[in-house]
Image: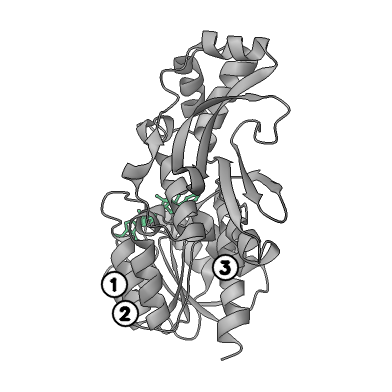
Amino acid sequence: MKVAIVGLGSVGRGVAEMIAKKSLGLTVTGIADSTSGIINAGGIDLHDVLDVKHKTGSCGDKKISANEVIKKADYDALVEVTPTNATTGEPGLSYIKMAIGRKKHVVTSNKGPIALAYRDLKKRAEKNGVVLRHEATVGGAIPIFHMIEHGLAGNEILAIFGVLNGTCNFILTRMSDEGLTYEQALLEARQMGYAEADPTYDVQGIDAAIKLVILANTIWGNGVTLNDVNRTGIDLLTPDALRLAEDEGSTIRLIAEAIPKKGLLRVSPRIIEKSHPLVVEGTLNAITLETDMAKEITLIGRGAGSIETASAIIGDLLFIRDRYVERA
Ligand SMILES: NC(=O)c1ccc[n+]([C@@H]2O[C@H](COP(=O)([O-])OP(=O)(O)OC[C@H]3O[C@@H](n4cnc5c(N)ncnc54)[C@H](OP(=O)(O)O)[C@@H]3O)[C@@H](O)[C@H]2O)c1
């Protein structure tokens, strides 16, 4: 199957490295970053491109833009891995629409377009006879959507509970294990490269809320938005609050919850028993689903990382290859 990749940062590089390393039957015919692009219908040498990107900061020809790669390259599926913009969805939103308009399948890790416009994008894809997959947008390497779609096929999903932001979980783990203040734990998260210079998105629960919106819309198709999420971050938590929880054999985690029958869509710090499956350590993510037949199922895994996120993207690509491209 022929693939084009737009975005060659942490995730895009991970995808390119894994396609180069493993014999997956995937040929990359177009690549672009923010300033350059390459189109080669015969297949791009990924080792060369990764080397050039590493040395020069650009992946290819400055005269070729991401738009051109999406519009002109010969590919079956676009991997869209540009930065998340939760307000406009751009540039990913336009890129995804452009590829679907050309009747190309799309795989993305970009939360912006999926949180803002999932219903519209899905409709466009259906109309054009292609699919849009976004496993990597929630829980990094955790194959939550594959599990719901296949392993839990026929189940009604009644509720979701998740630890969806690794940065917050790291901060809470350090506050709880070492008695650090929020500010000390945040500083440590920054030093370890887990928190951005501006950590607002993470610590105020916005990132977790975006992922909750994506989960809810994908599972129930209920068209909820970020404004529908009742959200409290971890930035006002004190070591005393954690100590009190610890005294009772519990701890505090930032939990995202969706229970449609109760109209509940919430991200907030919650006191939970230490033995609860959602009490994961460090930057891990965890998602519990409550279903009518299987009852409770929890998946735990790495919520971010170049190769970990590439795992989810490659899973989506191979799903498309096996179901739609090689059967065509
Ligand atoms: N990193 C993770 O662990 C992770 C996990 C799950 C989901 N995600 C999501 O996956 C996406 C990619 O994440 P990342 O960590 O790889 O981000 P990143 O390291 O910032 O890389 C973004 C890439 O997109 C390119 N880009 C920026 N603007 C562009 C434009 N207008 N047209 C074409 N390319 C453009 C950048 O180009 P330059 O190289 O030229 O700057 C860069 O190559 C984001 O939406 C993120 O939220 C990331």
On screen, 291 above or below 94?
Answer: above
Q: Nearer the viewer, residue 78 or 113?
A: 113
Where residue 24 sits in the image (x, y, percent)? 65, 74
User: Quadrant of the rendered structure where residue 70 is?
Assistant: bottom left
Where residue 42 sits in the image (x, y, percent)? 49, 86
Q: Residues within 10 Å of mark 1 (few under 14, many from 20)?
A: some
Display coloring: one colour
Q: Residues within 10 Å of mark 3 (few under 14, many from 20)?
A: many
On screen, 16 above or below 137?
Answer: below
Q: Which residue was labeled with disc 2?
A: 71
Taking the image as shown, residue 103 lies to the left or right of residue 299, namely left
Alpha carbon distance from label 1 to label 3 = 23 Å
Assign a secondary structure to mark 2: helix
Which corner quadrant holds the C terminus?
bottom right
Residue type beneath disc 3: Asp
Q: Which residue was labeled with disc 3?
A: 316
Q: Which residue was labeled with disc 1?
A: 67
- Mark 3 / mark 2, whichever is N-terminal: 2
Assign a secondary structure to mark 1: helix
- Mark 1 / mark 3, whichever is N-terminal: 1
Where residue 143 sits in the image (x, y, percent)? 62, 57
Q: How many marks?
A: 3
Which-is-in-front pick, marks 3 and 2?
3
Residue type beneath disc 1: Asn
Q: Nearer the viewer, residue 251 or 3?
A: 251
Residue type beneath disc 2: Lys
Which-is-in-front pick, marks 1 and 3?
3
Query: Marks 1 and 2: in contact by CB < 8 Å?
Result: yes
User: Quadrant of the rendered structure where residue 280 is?
Assistant: top right
Which corner quadrant holds the N terminus?
bottom right
Taking the image as shown, residue 112 lies to the left or right of residue 217, namely left
